[in-house]
Amino acid sequence: MPVIIRDINWEETDTNLVLHIPMKGAKANKLDVLSSDQYLKISFAPFFYEVFLYDLIHDAKSRIVVQDGFVEATLTKQIPRKWNQLAHVQSDDKEAMKSLREEALNQIAQKQKERIEANATLLNDNKREAVRQQMKIEEEERNRIDSIKKNERDKISEEMKQFEENQKVQRKLAIQNHIKSEELQPQKKSEKPEQKKTIFEENSAPESKVTVPLRDTGRIAVNFTSRIFPTPMRESQTDIEEEWLRKQKESRQAATDLQLDLSGNDKDIDYLKNKANQFFQQGNFQSAIGVYNHAIRVFPKMATLYLNRSACHFQVRNMIKCAEDCSRALELLNPPVLDNLPQRIKAHVRRGTAFCELELYAEGLLDYEAALKLSPDDENIQKDAQRIRNFLEKNQDFS
């Protein structure tokens, strides 16, 4: 049986109306509030309070605070003036209250519908904007490639043109030199003058070949230290690298053992996600990694798969692969739009945490600062970033 609250304290100014409603033990997360421009209902079991206000208020600007066994409602008036009374109708006028209550509920339902439609419109706009940005990037890339091809064609054409001009000049000089040499040779009167040969006929005559001995050839064998990692041996961290190789082997083995479970659904993305989530919730992280490995082979450009697999790598302490998957997810979450903002924040935070686990605190701080730029009001990210800064400052002062 609800306890209906009738006696409350209230005060007003020209612009605001403040109600103090006694509700013993009320908690903000348990409070049920329903309001419109002229109706307010607040309930916290077993307490119940409702009022049909004397005039209109700005529902969007209203504020509800719970403190010391009271619920304080601060309402903003639409028309600045004194009301001198709180309620529009008396509580004993049941017909009027019923009519106003139905009107208020209809108004609230209409606002909720408009809010849902606005959110859906915003989501569609964000998706269309993401598609437009992607198309713009692809068009710019095509234009850049076409420009490079055109420049290369122009360069080759210019080189060919210059080569042909040089050939013409060389042929002309060769003909002139041949004619001059023929004119300088004396001719005997008793002999029949020899028929002149053209430069092309002379060039067709066999030339004397000069044999040049070739140098002896050989092969020089160069042996390099076998390295899987890109760092040189003098900078290697053997323990961390061996652990990484062991986890890679376990992941490949888990992916091999998984083939029996994926028969018939190996290209169903929803089935693969659900299967990986089941393994993750059971604590079977290696099997979850195997599922994501297969899903990524089928859908290599889905950023969510890399982000989820990074969480599995983090659980098995494979921080290098965790950071790699976060980096790949950030590459695919491009262009940056509102629709993929939560995923980009999660990728930066997780990669920053993985860097810190690898004792790369400066790199981890860069990721946390990038996450703060995307979500400046997140208190958890702010605290973690400050702890990393304090750690770096402390170690810098110590050194």
Image (spheres, rainbow, N blue to C red):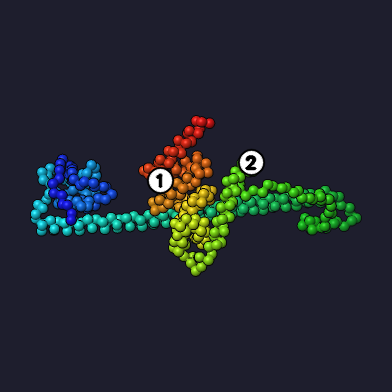
Percent from the top left, x then y, of residue 222?
A: 72, 47
User: In which quadrant of the rendered view does residue 79 lie?
Assistant: top left
Checking the image for residue 374, the label placed there is 1
The answer to whether 252 appears left or right of 97 in the picture is: right
Task: From the viewer's perspective, tell me whether residue 83 is left or right of residue 63.
Answer: left
Q: Nearer the viewer, mark 1 or mark 2?
A: 2
Give the side of residue 146 with respect to residue 70, left or right: right
The residues tagged by marks 1 and 2 sit, at their Cα atoms, a distance apart of 39 Å
Measuring 89% from the left and 54% from the top, which residue is drawn there? 189
SS category of the residue bearing label 1: helix
Front residue of 180/61: it is 61
Q: Nearer the viewer, residue 291 or 257?
A: 257
Image point 49% across, 51% down: which residue? 315
What is the crowding at mark 2: few (fewer than 14 residues within 10 Å), some, or many (at least 20)?
few
Q: Earlier in the sequence, mark 1 or mark 2?
A: 2
> What amino acid is found at the position of numbered circle 2 in the picture?
Arg
Say which residue label 2 marks.
Answer: 234
Q: Count how many numbered circles sit on residues in the image.
A: 2
- Residue 217: percent from left, percent from top: 79, 50
Q: Is residue 59 visible?
A: yes
Residue 203 coordinates in the image, percent (x, y): 79, 56
Is residue 98 placed above or below 12 in the rendered structure? below
Given the image, on which type of amino acid does mark 1 rest? Leu
Residue depicted at 47% across the width and 45% down the height: 353
Q: Which residue is farthest bottom?
A: 264
Pick the front one: 341 or 44: 44
Q: What x and y, as percent, mark residue 335?
A: 44, 52
Quarter of the image for residue 205 reads bottom right
Extreme residue toward the front, this view: 1
Tell me: 44 left or right of 196.
left
In terms of secondary structure, where does tag 2 sit? helix
Q: Residue at x 15, y 49 (%)?
A: 5
